[in-house]
Amino acid sequence: MLRAAGVGLGDEVVVPAFGNVEVAEAVAMAGAMPVFADIDPATYCLDAVAVEAAVTPRTAAVVVVHRFGRLADLARLHTLGARHGLLVLEQGESEAPYDEIAQRRERAGYLHAKLRGVRTPDDGDGHTYQQYVVRVPGNGRPDRDAFARAVRAKGVECRVPVKTPVHRLPEFRRCVSLPETERAADETLALPVDATLTKRDMQRIVSACNALGGLLQPAF
């Protein structure tokens, strides 16, 4: 899409660093330079204010990536694009059947109501919970990682959704301030909300997580 739009050598494209490296790689393959902007801490998608701050006379496009079943603020980003004459492209997520989304939302609602000691995700309009991402804040030690190990030891599958932001990778390393991206990479953990999970499975997730409150800061 970038090549088809004429984006190439000498152009800059604003992309998120929180997520997969493929977006930055696609920009580089088109001959352009990926420029990283920070995310909104609630949606994990590009923050419009941060994108505007990253725009230069060489900026040709913005690639918006939707995260974890939550949509980016497309209205603000398209307005920004129109103001600066930028192409705004979207990378969506794979779609699931309505019934599966409804079951994920039901399980997410259960976790919202029952979990203690972690920060549950912001519901947001149309959230499909492709991943149920909580925050386990640190306080000078790797609390998220310790929490994940302890939850797995209790038989609950969980995963770190973004282990290394793209701007920390050797091939795309940048000296750029992305505090929300850094914080999200250090604190986020995806808990299961698959449609196949039984009520007993959900109870096990809650029990395993709530038993670990001692690993966390008390300010919740």
Image (tube, rainbow, N blue to C red):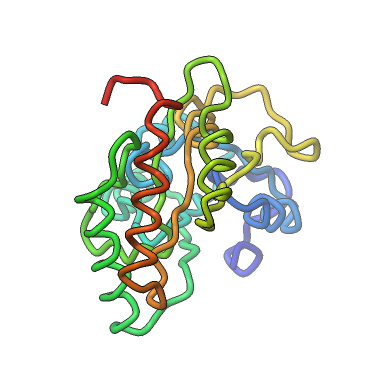
Considering the image in quadrants, where does the N terminus appear? Answer: bottom right
Residue sticking out furthest to the top: 140
Foreground pick, 192 / 42 = 192
Residue 80 screen position, x and y as percent: 34, 44
Residue 78 screen position, x and y as percent: 33, 53
Instruction: Using the image, determine if residue 24 lies above or below residue 103.
Output: above
* 83 sits left or right of 185 in the view: left
Foreground pick, 100 / 111 = 111
Residue 123 screen position, x and y as percent: 23, 53
- Residue at the image position 41 percent from the left and 78 percent from the top: 196
> Can you see residue 57?
no
- Residue at the image position 67 percent from the left and 51 percent from the top: 21
* 24 sits left or right of 155 in the view: right
Foreground pick, 113 / 78 = 113
Instruction: Using the image, determine if residue 218 lies above or below residue 112.
Output: above
Residue 214 screen position, x and y as percent: 41, 26
Residue sticking out furthest to the right: 170
Instruction: Using the image, determine if residue 188 lies above or below residue 61.
Output: above
Displayed quadrant of residue 163: top right
- Residue at the image position 24 percent from the left and 51 percent from the top: 112
Displayed quadrant of residue 131: bottom left
Instruction: Using the image, determine if residue 118 lies above or below residue 128.
Output: above
- Residue at the image position 31 percent from the left and 75 percent from the top: 101
> Can you see residue 84?
yes
Q: How many marks?
A: 0
Considering the image in quadrants, where does the C terminus appear? Answer: top left
* 135 sits left or right of 174 in the view: left
